[in-house]
């Protein structure tokens, strides 16, 4: 039987309470049993009520970080897509994105 340190137990409880993951997942990731983790949570859970809002804030903060990362990635994809897409041409052959007129020889005039 493996004897875990107090620091390991407290860190496992912190992860279980703030990560938002199911306890069986946390337990399997840490290599301990679900019942062991449950026992540690009941033993090391902060008794003061001020810790509960902190856990909620940490969970919300983590959710917002994830959402922020996803939105940044989506924005990058859209920026790259716009840059790589061919220009849209009108009926007269001019480019909508061009800043001048297209001359008869195909060169852009200012």
Image (tube, rainbow, N blue to C red):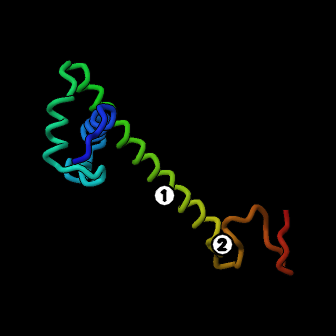
Q: Which one is in front, 55 or 84?
A: 55
Q: In which quarter of the image is residue 89?
A: bottom right
Q: Which residue is drawn at 79% across and 73% down?
A: 102
- Relative height, residue 98 to residue 49 (above, below): below
Q: Is residue 59 visible?
A: no
Which mark, by number, is residue 90?
A: none
Q: In this view, does 87 lie to the left or right of 32?
A: right
Marked residue nearer the N-terminal end (2 or 1): 1
The residue where tag 2 is placed is 87
The residue most toward the front is 1
In the rendered view of the protein, which quadrant contains the C terminus? bottom right
**In the image, which is nearer the foreground, mark 2 or mark 1?**
1
Query: How dense is the environment of label 2, judged by Cα within 10 Å: few (below 14), some, or many (20 and up)?
Result: few
Residue at the location (48% across, 58% down)?
74
Q: Is mark 2 on a helix, strand or loop?
A: loop
The residue at the point 86 percent across, 81 percent down is 105
Q: Where is residue 62 in the image (x, y as percent from the top left)?
A: 37, 41
The CA distance from mark 2 to mark 1 is 22 Å
Q: Is residue 1 left or right of residue 64?
A: left
Horizontal and vertical percent for residue 101?
A: 79, 68
Q: In this view, does 100 lie above or below 12?
A: below
Q: Residue 50 at what x, y percent from top left?
A: 24, 19
**Residue 27 point in image, percent of width and height:** 24, 49
Side of 89 relative to 38 (left or right): right
Task: Decide: few, some or many residues near mark 1? Use Cα within 10 Å; few <14, some 14-19, many ≥20.
Answer: few
Can you see residue 52? yes
Residue 20 versus residue 82 in the image, above or below: above
Dot 1: what SS?
helix
Q: Determine which residue is flagged by label 1.
A: 74
> In screen coordinates, is 49 left or right of 14?
left
Q: Nearer the viewer, residue 105 or 73?
A: 73
């Amino acid at each position: 039987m493996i004897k875990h340190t107090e620091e390991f137990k407290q860190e496992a409880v912190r992860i279980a309470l703030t990560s938002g993951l199911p306890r069986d997942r946390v337990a399997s990731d840490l290599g301990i049993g679900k019942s062991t983790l449950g026992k540690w949570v009941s033993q090391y859970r902060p008794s003061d009520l001020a810790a509960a809002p902190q856990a909620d804030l940490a969970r919300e903060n983590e959710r917002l970080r994830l959402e922020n990362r996803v939105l940044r990635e989506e924005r990058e994809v859209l920026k790259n897509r716009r840059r790589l897409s061919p220009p849209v041409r009108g009926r007269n052959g001019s480019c909508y994105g061009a800043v001048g007129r297209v001359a008869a020889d195909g060169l852009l005039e200012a």
